[in-house]
Image (cartoon, helix red, strand yellow):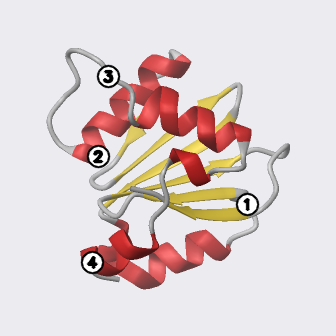
């Protein structure tokens, strides 16, 4: 998927019907915070660490966080390896997957139903 296709399919917070994803979107992914690192991947990981007060286990292009709201997997540029990203979306371990184009986020939380979100 290229950036234009993503932009045309992507939704904003006004189209979200999942309270969990809406809260994640408004309170974590797009809230204003001073001191955030540069780079979208590093910023998302930093915001999740601050929100849940946990440290992320990081590798080259992924980070995982275990929180009281479930497990988060953050992927830098998920469309670089489209096959890998599609297999994560299809994996039943991850109830919610969020595609921000430059960052992919997968959430394992038994209270959520299986959904995939493409967000701006």
Q: CA distance from mark 3 to mark 1?
A: 31 Å
Give the mark nearer the N terminus: 4 vs 2. 4
* Residue at far front of view: 14
Q: Residue 93 shows which numbered tag?
A: 1
- Decide: few, some or many residues near mark 1? Use Cα within 10 Å; few <14, some 14-19, many ≥20: some
Q: CA distance from mark 2 to mark 1?
A: 22 Å
Q: Classify 66 as above or below 107.
A: above
- Name the spot of residue 96 as percent of width and height, x first: 66, 56
Q: Classify 96 as above or below 37.
A: below
Give the mark nearer the N terminus: 4 vs 3. 4
Q: Residue 41 shows which numbered tag?
A: 2
Question: Is there any visible trace of residue 78 in the rendered image?
Answer: yes
Relative placement, left or right, of 99 versus 18 is left
Q: Which residue is mark 3?
A: 32
Label 1 close to label 4 by CB (< 8 Å) = no
Give the mark nearer the N terminus: 3 vs 1. 3
Kindly identify the residue that appears in the image at 30 percent across and 18 percent down: 33
- Decide: few, some or many residues near mark 3? Use Cα within 10 Å; few <14, some 14-19, many ≥20: few
């Amino acid at each position: 998927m290229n950036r234009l296709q993503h932009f045309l399919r992507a939704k904003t917070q006004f189209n979200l019907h999942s309270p969990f994803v809406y809260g994640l979107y408004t309170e974590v992914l797009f809230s204003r915070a001073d001191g955030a690192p540069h780079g979208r991947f590093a910023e998302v990981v930093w915001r999740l660490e601050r929100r849940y007060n946990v440290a992320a286990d990081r590798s080259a292009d992924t980070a995982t966080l275990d929180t009281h709201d479930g497990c988060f997997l953050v992927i830098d540029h998920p469309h670089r390896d489209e096959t890998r990203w599609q297999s994560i979306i299809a994996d039943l371990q991850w109830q919610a997957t969020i595609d921000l184009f430059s960052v992919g986020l997968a959430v394992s939380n038994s209270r959520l139903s299986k959904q995939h979100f493409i967000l701006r």
